[in-house]
Amino acid sequence: MSQPPFEPQPGQPSYGQPYGQQPGYQPPQQPGYQAPPPPGYDAPPPGYQAPQQPGYPAPPPGFPAAPPPGYPMAPPPKKKNTVLKIVLIAVAAVVVLCIAGVAAVFFIGKDAVDDAAKVTITEPATLGGRPKLEDGEFAALITEMESSLAKYPGASDSFGAFYGNAEEQDIVAAIATKATLIDPAKELDASFKAFAEGSQLKDKAPADTGALGGSAECATTTSSGTDIAVCGWADEGSVGMILWFFKTAADVQAEFPKLRAEIETKSK
């Protein structure tokens, strides 16, 4: 006699459902098994990587693809300073001093020699409070300046240097040498004339010589559309020039004698 089919009683598990399984139960996963995405979710294609923010480098494996919200981005690299393109004119100024050694002659009187001996030229550690610029950008220019100055007739204690802050566009070039001159005014005039052959000068006028005497003039030239103030001096024992980049002659008239006094001194 056959048995009637089993009818589960209320509250008892039916065939096809494991005994004791609770609603929402998920069977244990096998190794390598990945659960399907929830309904409505579009899975990214294989090899997909989150987009990177501009300027943000790709992170190493295991790190988030983008910085968390609010995280500051790295600042963009500073633009290359264009000061070097402008300060090249300082080298031309040095050549001027070499070419214009017209007043240094073989026959110099004893008085001129004695007066020249009282002059001392010093390369200051700072100039007008500005620190020296000696990094790679300016080192080659300084070497060329000093090499040219050494060729000046009768030169000694020569130097060329840059001072200031390039990023703040506060740059000063100074070049000077000790030499015995019998006609400082003629020497200075020859220097400015030679300078004008390579760079147009304007607003040239006499400048204050302070307690050091001799002859001094200032003028304005331009390079790459930028003004450059040029002041030069010559006396019985020295000749030199100071260049202010991003300035005009009118801007530096008051500072020139002060800076010259930091370079040149005279004994009684």
Image (spheres, rainbow, N blue to C red):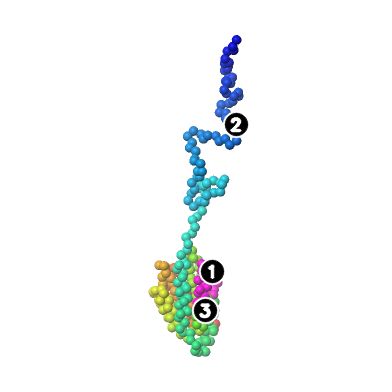
Q: Nearer the viewer, residue 122 or 258?
A: 122
Disc 1 to disc 2, how far (Cα)?
A: 72 Å
Disc 1 to disc 3, how far (Cα)?
A: 19 Å
Q: Residues within 10 Å of mark 3 (few under 14, many from 20)?
A: some
Residues rendered magenta in the picture: 123-150
Classify the position of the C terminus by image quarter: bottom right
**Residue 257: % across, % down:** 48, 76
Reply above or below: 47 against 253. Answer: above
Residue pictured at 48% horizontal, 70% vertical: 172
| Label ID, residue 28 | 2
Residue holding disc 3: 150
Residue holding disc 1: 134
Q: Residues within 10 Å of mark 1 (few under 14, many from 20)?
A: some
**Residue 73: % across, % down:** 50, 51
Q: Nearer the viewer, residue 6 or 246?
A: 6
Of label 1 and label 2, which has the lower sequence position? 2
